[in-house]
Image (cartoon, rainbow, N blue to C red):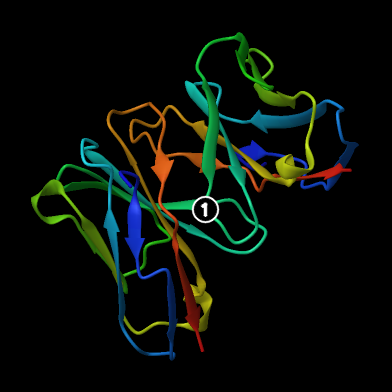
Amino acid sequence: QKEVEQNSGPLSVPEGAIASLNCTYSDRGSQSFFWYRQYSGKSPELIMSIYSNGDKEDGRFTAQLNKASQYVSLLIRDSQPSDSATYLCAVEPNSGSYKYIFGTGTRLKVLA
Amino acid sequence: DTGVSQDPRHKITKRGQNVTFRCDPISEHNRLYWYRQTLGQGPEFLTYFQNEAQLEKSRLLSDRFSAERPKGSFSTLEIQRTEQGDSAMYLCASSFAPGVEQFFGPGTRLTVL
């Protein structure tokens, strides 16, 4: 079992729709969770962090965390073609080193 | 620009050559991380520093790889006797405290011929 799992996609949504991206993780002791956006050939860009159960909203983005079920999700409202990218889920396991474990990413395509 | 910077942005080398990459973190960040990313994969952790101390190295970091962070400022990652399997994007990230957001530099893309 991979430590952080994401569906590789592509996930295609029409412009203006809600995109829902999911991530599951194996280390139940994980404390910190992050979503990054990565355009082709570029480096990861931080979108959001979430540390406690529930929802966290920032503009068009909402991160959701459920530690009991070991999943974290990202909702993108009013999706735009410029949101087309790979979305990486990163988890900081309870290892004491504070390194991130990344999923393989979900490729999102927003269709105009 | 006060973000993380990396140099060079691209490096093409022949198998067996040594290469060195540099990372300058955000100035107030005392933690610095190196990751490697290959096509279709997420970044994989290589090593990290708190100030000048290298506190963890991944098993991915073979004896051909070495990293330093003298004086707790910039960091270098050296790969000796490069192999074609070393071709990847090498990413540097920094954070100001444990457990908080890491910010990535633009990366160095290495191609080993």
Location of residue A50 with respect to A16 vertically, above or below: above
Indicate the secondary structure of the residue bearing disc 1: loop
Res. A61 image quadrant = top right
Residue reaching furthest top? A54
Kindly tell me whether residue B85 is visible in this rendering.
yes
**Residue found 51% across the figure and 75% down from its top:** B87
**Residue found 46% across the figure and 39% down from its top:** A100
Q: Position of residue B54 (x, y in %)?
A: 21, 49
Res. B83 image quadrant = bottom left
Left or right: A93 with respect to B76? right
Residue reaching furthest left? B71
Q: Position of residue A63 (x, y in %)?
A: 64, 20
Q: Amino acid at mark 1?
A: Ser
Location of residue A69 with respect to B109 vertically, above or below: above
Tag 1 residue:
A43
Q: Quadrant of the C terminus of chain A?
A: top right
Q: Position of residue A20 (x, y in %)?
A: 79, 28
Q: Tell which of A85 and B57 is nearer to you.
A: A85
Q: Position of residue A48 (x, y in %)?
A: 55, 26
**Residue found 40% across the figure and 52% down from its top:** B105
Location of residue B9 with respect to A54 vertically, above or below: below
Kindly tell me whether residue A67 is visible in this rendering.
no
**Residue found 62% across the figure and 43% down from its top:** A103
Q: How many marks?
A: 1
